[in-house]
Amino acid sequence: MRPNDIPVPLATLMVATCNVLNLANPGRMFYDNQDPYTQAEFDRKLTWLGDRFRTLNADVLAVQEVWDDAALKGAIGRSGLRYDFVAVPGAENNGAVHGGGAQGTPRVGIATRLKVDALQSFAEFPPGFEVDVPGLGRHLRFERPPLVVTLHMKHGQTLNVLTAHLKSKRPKFLQDAQGHPLEDRSDPKVMALASLRSLIMRGAEAMALRCLVIDLLHRTSVPLVVLGDFNDTPDSVTTQLICATNEIAYDRGARDVALFNAYELQGDAALKKDVAYSHIHQGSPSVLDQILVSEEFLHNGRNSIGDVRRVDYFNDHLHEGRDRSRSDHGFVRALLRLRMQADARQDTAAAGGVPPDRPQPHSPAPQATTAASSAAAPGPSMPPPPFDPVTKP
């Protein structure tokens, strides 16, 4: 706190990111090399996810690898929590348990208790930012389109949340329209080239995501939270490309469009334990699932209007063996705080205290409640309107 600062109430916001590992309706094919879920497997998966969602108790839940929005709504229904807005663009079932859903690749989605002002999915790279991939040609769109949602907190604050799922490190081999291989996958040189393709594609997606971040942040005071599965570590080239944090060392004005790792911004009261990993590959733990925030969450920053109170990793299940009814990723949750607006502070003072912005879990829904009825009707899907931002100094 600066010496002349007057303490102001801070509203809390809990955000979490969850790669739910191929969440699809029972009996439907999602990948040709994987069997559909049986009804028993599907029930186990929804129950497991519901338990995790209840533990997270997040105001904003960003999810990746969703094939069917009906399945996500079913898992939320089993959590006993109420989310008035649930959306997975490209994976809609339109109320039907069978039919519809994502095709070719899973999608990202959002569930939230907050008021949604706007929602937009971005499939294409910005014009002029296409990249050539050896053997594949021009790469000009996201494999899994990122999603931006503009939210309105009950104390008046507006913020943008962006969730993404970048290309994995899995080698990208050439294949024909029927999925038959066009190159020798046992050849180590072919393997190297296929891995390079994946790296180029992930780098191109990171670049396009960076462009979106700049558009959302440039000379505005609207906070931004970016979270999801980046398929790379916080210190990787692709993550740093998205954040551009290193640019601050040479240009202080670069803070305007930079992102910061929420884990590194935790308050002094947070207990930083050596359990910060969200994925285990061949016995090696790493952080692939990340929460990034804009400079508005820098404690005592020039344009700060909040902070990062705590970041938690829920990863115990990664040591319980591979089971597709669970997830192969840990879930990450951050407790953020935002300054309340003047009129909200006056209302709070009149009420004699600072009410929590995050409600407690609702009682579990009655047994008769269906998955479809546990989630609200689709919310706005129009492109975000101009933010009418407050210009930064």
Image (spheres, rainbow, N blue to C red):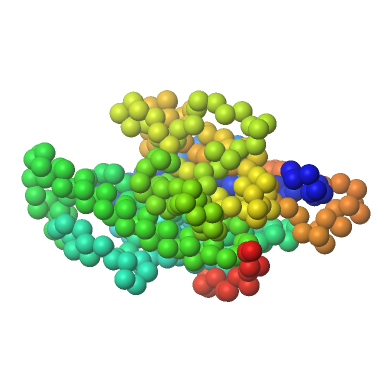
**Residue closest to the eye, 37 or 18:** 18
On the picture, is 12 further left or further right than 122?
Answer: right
Measured from the top left, where is residue 93 in percent x and y?
45, 61
Which residue lies at the image location 18% right of the left edge and 63% below the top edge? Answer: 137
Measured from the top left, where is residue 33 in percent x and y?
23, 45
**Residue closest to the eye, 311 or 307:** 307
Number of marks present in the image shown? 0
Q: Can residue 260 be seen in this view?
A: yes
**Residue closest to the eye, 132 or 169:** 132
Q: Can residue 29 be seen in this view?
A: no
Relative to residue 348, is residue 274 depicted above or below? above
Relative to residue 219, is residue 266 depicted above or below? above
User: Which quadrant of the figure contains the C terminus?
Assistant: bottom right
Measured from the top left, where is residue 98 in percent x and y?
40, 58
Measured from the top left, where is residue 272 in percent x and y?
57, 29
Which residue lies at the image location 82% right of the left edge and 62% below the top edge? Answer: 343
**Residue closest to the eye, 42 or 169:** 169
On the picture, is 390 further left or further right than 235?
Answer: right
Relative to residue 379, is residue 19 depicted above or below? above
Q: Residue furthest front?
A: 250
Which residue lies at the image location 48% right of the left edge and 62% below the top edge? Answer: 214
